[in-house]
Amino acid sequence: MNTDKSYFVHPTAFIEDDVKIGDGTKIWHQVQVRKGAAIGKNCIFGKSVFIDFEVTIGDNVKIQNFVSVYHGVTLEDDVFVGPHVCFTNDLLPRAANPDWELVPTLVKKGASIGANATVVCGITIGEYSMIGAGSLVSKDVPAHGLVFGNPARLKGYVCYCGNILKRSNEPLPYFITLTCEKCNKQITT
C-alpha cells in the first residue's frame, strides 16, 4: 500500500511517469498504466489491465481483469468494463504505417460493457447503455440502448439501474416513453 498516497497500487503494477490517479482508486496485480493517463477517483482496475498513454478515465469506473484500453479511448464516470474487453484505435491496422491516424472512442457516463466485447474505434457508447457479453460493437450505441451480438444490434433499452425497460405509451413522432418495472423510473428515447 502506498502510505503517502490517497490511492492503492499493488507492488506488481507498473505506473509510468506523469500519470494522474484520483483518491480512493485501487490498481491491482500486474496492471500497466502508461504516461499521461488520467484516472479519476474511486476506480478499480483488476488484474492485468492495460491503460495506454493519454487515456482519460472518469470517477467510479470499474475495469475488470485483462482489459485493454488503448490511446484515444475516453471512459466517462461510472462506466463498467467487464473482463477481457478490448478497445481498438485504428480502422486500418498495419504493423508499420507512417500515416497512422488515431480514431477516438467515447464511452459515456454509466455505460456497461460485458465480458469479451470488442469495441471498434470511432464510435460513441451512450449514457447508461449496456453491451452484451461477447459483442462486436462497430456502431454508435444510443443512450440507454441494449445491444448484443456480432455485430451488436439494438435489442431494447435499459434503465439507470440496468433493468430492461418496457414501453409505457404509444410512440409519438420522435420518441417513446419507457418504464422500469424494478425502480419505476421513466425514460424517454
Image (cartoon, rainbow, N blue to C red):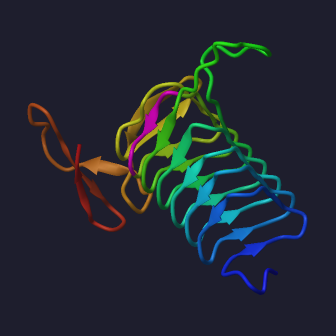
Query: What residue sits 55% from the left and 51% below the top?
Result: 56
Q: Nearer the viewer, residue 70 or 161?
A: 70
Say which quadrant the C terminus sits in: top left
Place of residue 158 in the rendered image (x, y in percent of width and height, measured from the top left):
39, 50
The extreme right residue here reads 12
Taking the image as shown, residue 40 lies to the left or right of residue 99, namely left
Say which quadrant the N terminus sits in: bottom right
Query: What residue sits 82% from the left and 53% below the top?
Result: 48
Up-down relation of residue 156 to residue 25 (above or below) = above
Q: Nearer the viewer, residue 155 or 145?
A: 145
Magenta-highlighted stretch: main secondary structure? loop
Q: Which residues are magenta?
A: 122-127
Taking the image as shown, residue 87 lies to the left or right of residue 13, namely left
Place of residue 51 in the rendered image (x, y in percent of width and height, measured from the top left):
70, 48
Number of marks in the rendered image: 0
Query: What residue sits 87% from the left and 58% below the top?
Result: 30
Query: What residue sits 71% from the left and 81% below the top?
Result: 5
Residue 8 within the segment the image draws in magenta: no
The extreme left residue here reads 173
Up-down relation of residue 149 to residue 158 (above or below) = above
Place of residue 141 in the rendered image (x, y in percent of width and height, measured from the top left):
41, 35
Place of residue 119 in the rendered image (x, y in percent of width and height, measured from the top left):
59, 33
Q: Nearer the viewer, residue 74 or 144?
A: 74
